[in-house]
Image (cartoon, rainbow, N blue to C red):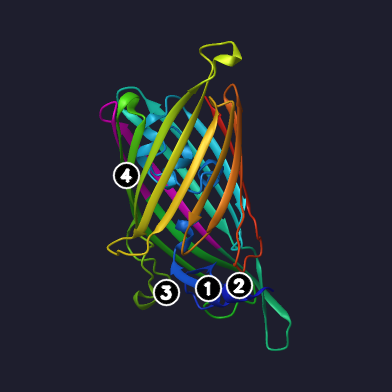
């Protein structure tokens, strides 16, 4: 069992809802830290700088206001394998003309089954620590330039055990939180969008008792994105065009200043048919470093891939790959 897995098993056996990340070679423990894991290949490919991006279901993880621009219903699957474990998310959104966009999300992090041994080294049980978040989202465009969104989160940490389970080997903690976000567009053609979101505002995650309750990783993020149309008359069709999106986010723990996380990214391509992305995340806790991505779409089906290239980390999976599959209906 690797070092991080041993530590995770110890945390689970003690009933403490710790998630382990490695930043600059040192472990960072916090309640429900999985809520800071990036989700979605588009976001990761752009260095996670998507607080001001609109029109994709996966932006709900950074700013729920971004889904207000959805014109058709969307179902999507997102998956990746991080050092902590496998992450999988399902999102579904339903726009209603004149009312807004309604959505639901399931986000699961599975840290893998862990063996529990007695003093003689004999395996006596297996534990299965997992994190789960259920989101219910509503977003609406107040005007063509202003969007607001809110997500209610039901957050759970649980450790299931089978076999001869030692005391406190199992545990469960449930809490509640909100994500609040807004976006507004300015300039000619509303090319510049600004996004603001407050994420994971809620109650501490408590498993056994109040003394062990951990505060949620509440974050304030401010971002901007600029879209530039690149006409390509050489293609022989005036309507054919490329576009370039440049984005940047700044994120800090709520009510703290100084030394924030900074994320920058670019996305260029021909409509939704082909997209190429790149970015860099200067993140203190989590996945920090450069990333690249690509997206393709045909008809109502789209697939996105992204990969991060990390350095100076103690990750079991050094360069995780993110995959997103979506269907519009």
Q: Label 3: which residue? A: 208
Q: Which circle's residue, 4 or 3, is located before the other in the chain?
A: 4
Horizontal side of 182 relative to 295 (left or right) equals left
In the displayed structure, 255 sits above or below 59; it is below
Q: CA distance from mark 2 to mark 1?
A: 8 Å
Q: Which residue is mark 4?
A: 181
If you read the primary sequence from the N terminus, does the residue marked by circle 2 or circle 1 appear first?
Answer: 2
Q: Nearer the viewer, mark 3 or mark 2?
A: 2
Where does the image place residue 60, in percent across and percent down from the top left? Answer: 42, 43
Alpha carbon distance from label 3 to label 1: 23 Å
Question: Upstream in the sequence, badge 3 or badge 1?
Answer: 1
* Secondary structure of the residue carrying numbered label 4: strand
Secondary element at image label 1: strand
Q: Which mark is residue 117?
A: none
Mark 4 packing: few (<14 Cα in 10 Å), some, or many (20+)? many
Instruction: Tell me whether circle 2 and circle 1 mark residues in contact (CB < 8 Å).
Output: yes
State the residue in front, 124 or 151: 151
Q: CA distance from mark 4 to mark 1?
A: 30 Å
Disc 4 vs disc 2: Cβ atoms closer than 8 Å? no
Marks 4,3: beta carbons within 8 A: no
Q: Which residue is mark 1?
A: 27
Residue 239 inside the magenta-drawn segment: no
Seen in the image, is 120 located left or right of residue 197? right
Residue labelled with disc 2: 4
Q: CA distance from mark 4 to mark 2?
A: 34 Å
Nearest the viewer among 267 and 48 is 267
Main SS of residues in magenta: strand
Q: Quadrant of residue 59?
A: top left
The image quadrant that residue 63 belongs to is top left
Segment tinted magenta in the rendering: 130-152
């Amino acid at each position: 069992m690797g070092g991080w897995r041993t530590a995770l098993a110890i945390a689970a056996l003690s009933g403490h809802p710790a998630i382990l990340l490695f930043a600059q070679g040192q472990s960072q423990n916090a309640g429900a830290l999985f809520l800071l894991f990036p989700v979605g290949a588009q976001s990761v490919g752009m260095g996670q700088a998507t607080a001001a991006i609109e029109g994709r279901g996966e932006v709900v993880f950074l700013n729920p206001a971004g889904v207000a621009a959805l014109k058709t219903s969307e179902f999507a699957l997102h998956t990746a394998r991080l050092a902590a474990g496998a992450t999988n998310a399902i999102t579904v959104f339903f726009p209603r003309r004149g009312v807004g966009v309604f959505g639901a999300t399931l986000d699961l992090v599975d840290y893998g089954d862990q063996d529990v041994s007695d003093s003689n080294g004999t395996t006596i049980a297996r534990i299965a620590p997992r994190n789960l978040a259920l989101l219910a989202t509503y977003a609406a465009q107040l005007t063509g330039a202003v969007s607001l969104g809110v997500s209610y989160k039901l957050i759970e940490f649980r450790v299931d055990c089978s076999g001869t389970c030692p005391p406190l080997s199992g545990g469960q903690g449930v809490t509640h939180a909100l994500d609040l976000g807004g976006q507004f567009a300015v300039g000619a053609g509303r090319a510049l969008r600004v996004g603001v979101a407050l994420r994971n505002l809620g109650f501490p995650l408590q498993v056994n008792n109040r003394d062990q309750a951990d505060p949620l990783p509440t974050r304030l993020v401010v971002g901007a994105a600029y879209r530039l149309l690149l006409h390509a008359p050489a293609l022989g069709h005036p309507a054919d065009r490329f576009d370039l999106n440049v984005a940047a986010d700044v994120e800090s723990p709520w009510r703290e200043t100084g030394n924030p996380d900074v994320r920058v990214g670019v996305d260029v391509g021909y409509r939704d048919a082909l997209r190429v992305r790149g970015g860099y995340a200067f993140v203190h806790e989590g996945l920090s470093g450069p990333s690249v991505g690509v997206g393709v779409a045909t008809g109502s089906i789209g697939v996105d891939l992204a990969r991060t290239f990390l350095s100076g980390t103690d990750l079991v999976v050094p360069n995780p790959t993110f995959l997103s599959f979506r269907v519009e209906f």
